[in-house]
Image (cartoon, rainbow, N blue to C red):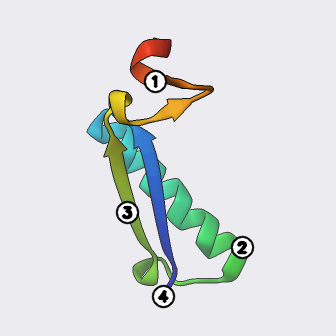
Amino acid sequence: MPLAQLYLAEGRTPEQKKVLIEKVTQAFVDALGSKPETVSIIVQDIPKNAWGTGGKTLAERG
């Protein structure tokens, strides 16, 4: 029962997340032979002021 936990900066639409979940599920099916109904995907939106890269938050980076 594969589980993928994905972290994204906030701002993606529900439709974008739906497509992401479908494609990641399909990747498990293709790579591991998993049955789609056994694949779980968790998408977590992270506020841009709580995610930093290069010493700056994503909010600061724009």
In whole angstroms, how far apart are the C-alphas of marks 4 and 2? 14 Å
Q: Amino acid at mark 3?
A: Ile
Instruction: Please name the residue shown 68% across and 71% down the image.
Output: 30
User: Helix, strand, or loop for circle 2?
Assistant: helix
Residue 23 at x, y = what percent?
Answer: 53, 55
In whole angstroms, how far apart are the C-alphas of marks 2 and 3? 19 Å
**Of labels 2 and 3, the one closer to you:** 3
Residue 58, label in figure: 1
**Of labels 2 and 1, the one closer to you:** 1
Q: Residues within 10 Å of mark 3 (few under 14, many from 20)?
A: few
Going from the N terminus, do you reach mark 4 or mark 2 first?
A: 4
Q: Amino acid at mark 4?
A: Met
Instruction: Please name the residue shown 54% across and 59% down the image.
Output: 24
Q: Which residue does the numbered mark 4 point to in the structure image?
A: 1
Q: Residues within 10 Å of mark 4 (few under 14, many from 20)?
A: few
Q: Amino acid at mark 2?
A: Ala
In whole angstroms, how far apart are the C-alphas of marks 1 and 3? 21 Å
Q: Are marks 2 and 3 in contact (CB under 8 Å)?
A: no
Q: Are marks 4 and 3 in contact (CB under 8 Å)?
A: no
Up the image or down, 39 lies above or below 54; here it is below
Residue 31, label in figure: 2
User: Helix, strand, or loop for circle 4?
Assistant: loop
Disc count in the image?
A: 4
**Does the rendering let one see residue 12?**
no
The answer to which of 17 and 45 lies nearer the viewer is 45
**Of labels 1 and 4, the one closer to you:** 1
Going from the N terminus, do you reach mark 1 or mark 3 first?
A: 3
